[in-house]
Amino acid sequence: MRSDHSALSTESSSVVNEPIPSQLSVASDHSSLSTESISNMDELIPSELSTTTLRRFNVFLVFIPLSWAIHFTLPDQHTLIFVSSFLAIISLDKLRAYATDDLSIRVGQTLAGLLNATLENVVELIVSPSQNANSIVQSSFLVLGMCFFAGGMRFSEQGFGLGTMQLNSSLLTISAIAILLPGAFHMALQGYPSYSELSTNYSILRISHGLAIILLFIYSSYLVVQLFSHKALYDGNNADIQKTKGYEGHNPWLQLRLYRRKAAKPIVSPEPMDDEEAIIDTTGFASTEDADSEVETYMSVPVALGLLVVVTALIAATAEFLVDSINGLNESQVISKEFIAVILLPIVGNVTSVTAAFKGHITLSLGVAVGSSIQVALFVAPFIVTLAWTMGKPLTFLFDPLESIVLFVSVLTVNYVIQDGKSNWLEGMILMGLYLILAVTFWFYPGTSLSEMMFVGC
């Protein structure tokens, strides 16, 4: 009798715990409806600008109106203006990275990288012309290093076009020599008995005008090669591109990321892994196909171009506030102007390159990073000198001696790093380490009056 009662109790318990079919149907319909609603919401809003994406950066997006408000209401608070503008530009550049990544799928990585570099260098026209050399250095060390390191966290080796990078290295070398020559000319004539500051400045001015015309001609030829005559050389499917290799077995970087994500979850019943975790757990992104398969286009070309232009305009205006606050920080002796110009400013505005490298689009990443350096050296700086020439203002290529030497060293270092046509995270760490070495040096560097002689009196 007791045994029958136990059996009856067990059967009753199983009946109570068994879900009713109607409940299963309702729950399934509710789950399907919820999933469908979320899917429809993501279709209405472009994925790159969806609420899921913006949630990660909503805190930084607040600094966009905040930086503008502080600039106009508290113009003497230079530190607040600098910090808020700094964070605002980072968030704006993230939006520009979304548009560039989407545009690269439609028009190609090379053209998208060139367009992004062009819009990015619009900000360079706001910054003092003496910072053009710094822009080349930061793109060579910091940006390229971050790209290699970010890509190395996902891939064992990332391959790129060796012939293309060698051509770009040659262009950077020519530009570095052109920037160094006026300074070398100035120092060489100082030892002569007949040395005259006025005549030397006039000679440097004439030399700068000639160099500007030559560099602009070289850049025009570079555009013809890149977009027309040798377009296949810059194509992402070029046979000259080295193969991108994944990690053998598990990716240690992404395994650490997955471990930290699981450790942060509460101890409950195990949840099914999402697609990203499943790929990490099984293949560790062993090929570039995994990276390419997750890329989709959500914006048309006009929308992406419009977003690029609007975001670049906001970056340009915010960068002007940032530059204005530098003089105030320099006067208060909080931080040197050279450290801000060479170390801090390069950090902002380079999210696009790093994001593209992590997604496996190394061609787009190098197109933005290296292409930006080439454009600054061969177009932006010569254009500013030529524009000043037409306006009757004496502007030269006479840069700070230390910055000029660092520029030449950076070009040589980049030539050594990219000569094998592939990259890994250690090469990125080396470039970033060299940039930190420069940071320590420029922290104590007071600057010289020679950099101010870009504007010479003749």
Image (tube, rainbow, N blue to C red):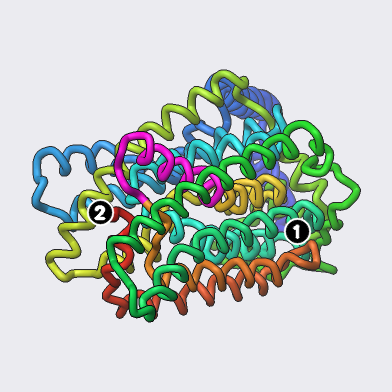
Q: Nearer the viewer, residue 285 or 397?
A: 397
Tell me what residue is drawn at x 86 percent, y 57 percent: 243
Q: Position of residue 399 (x, y in %)?
A: 39, 63
Query: What type of secondary structure mainly makes up the magenta span?
Result: helix
Residue that sits furthest to the right in the current view: 239
Say if the magenta span includes residue 21. Answer: no
| Residue 335 appearing in the image | yes
Local packing at callout 1 (Cα closer than 10 Å; few below 14, some 14-19, many 20+) is some
Q: Which residue shows up at 33% across the image and 68% down it?
A: 339
Q: Mark 2 to mark 1: distance in Å?
A: 39 Å
Q: Is residue 26 visible?
A: no
Q: Is residue 315 left or right of residue 458?
A: right
Residue bounds of the magenta highlight: 375-395
Q: Is residue 156 above or below residue 109?
A: below
Q: Amino acid at mark 2?
A: Gly
Q: Amino acid at mark 1?
A: Gln
Residue 176, position as x, y percentages in the image: 56, 62
* Between 175 and 273, the one nearer to me in the picture: 175
Is label 2 in a helix, a strand or a loop? Answer: loop
- Residue where numbered disc 2 is placed: 457
Residue 11 sits above or below residue 49 on the image:
below
Specify the quadrant that holds the N terminus.
Answer: bottom right
138 sits to left or right of 314? right
Count the numbered circles shown: 2
Image disc number at residue 166: 1
